[in-house]
Amino acid sequence: MTVPLLQVAGVAKRFGRVVTARDVSFEVSAGEALGLVGPNGAGKTTLLDIVAGTRRADAGSVVLDGQDLTRLGAAARADLGVARSYQVPRPFAGLTVYENVLVGASFAGRRHGGDTRDRAWHALEVTGLAGAADTPSGSLRLLDRKRLEVARALATGPRLLLLDEIAGGLTERELPQVVGLVRRLRDDGVAVVWIEHVLHALLDVVDRLLCLAAGEVIAQGDPHEVIRSPEVVEVYLGSTVDSVPGESA
């Protein structure tokens, strides 16, 4: 029996009276992409923070490839192969694209060894940024800032990649580049957990979908079955999201 790469079990988190995670459990296998959706304030980013180690859960566990990460911080988890991108890209504006990615690659040294420059360049090639390697990152358009955010995470050599709304704000002509990038990472064996409000982009890639509302899992499974779920339609698809081809909003 294949053991999932990531196992999240019974995770709970509250801030005062506000519950952002209540008994959240899910699994992701290597080379699988899980989409994470829900209305604003549902607890999606908090859940990614808990998996990445930037926030500590009040209860529950996070296990990667059989190793319990629950008490480990973000740096230790990064060493073990957990990487993430953020909703708002914040590159080091005074550095070039290549130098930004080199910073990410340097954090993988203890686990990978070898030449950080090779890892940085590979990340640029995978994300389509090799031609912009010498460009000051502060001058990038939004699409390239989003790709740079992924490249910096990818340069650490992750087994698990956590993505937070990397399609947000992009045009319809730009979206296929992001979708193709995530698909390539998944096909290369990287496990992906992707928060996204641009549903048609998400549904083009993910193998399964999980919907959160008020910190609770209200549906998970086949993406199109989850989208059709009456609970999901009521709490999520009635909110401000893009339309899904073939689905009623």
Image (tube, helix red, strand yellow):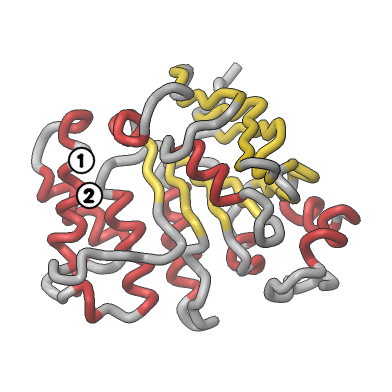
Image vertical order of residue 27 relative to residue 180, above or below: above
Question: Dot 1 corresponds to which residue?
Answer: 107
Q: Which residue is at the front of the view, 238 or 201?
A: 238
Question: Dot 2 corresponds to which residue?
Answer: 104
Q: In screen coordinates, is 93 left or right of 249?
A: left
Q: Report how far apart the C-alphas of labels 1 and 2 lie in the structure.
A: 6 Å
Q: Are the residues tagged 1 and 2 within 8 Å (C-beta)?
A: yes
Q: Quadrant of residue 9?
A: top right
- The residue tagged with tag 1: helix, strand or loop? loop
Q: Is residue 131 visible?
A: no
Q: Amino acid at mark 2?
A: Gly
> Which residue is pictured at 46% across the width and 57% down the height?
182
Number of marks? 2
Q: Quadrant of the C terminus?
A: bottom right
Image vertical order of residue 167 relative to residue 226, above or below: below
Q: Amino acid at mark 1?
A: Phe
Q: Position of residue 234 (x, y in %)?
A: 87, 61
Q: Position of residue 231 (x, y in %)?
A: 87, 53
Q: Quadrant of the N terminus?
A: top right
Q: Quadrant of residue 2?
A: top right
Q: In screen coordinates, is 194 left or right of 121?
A: right
> Which residue is pictured at 49% across the width and 32% down the height?
56
Q: Position of residue 4 (x, y in %)?
A: 55, 26
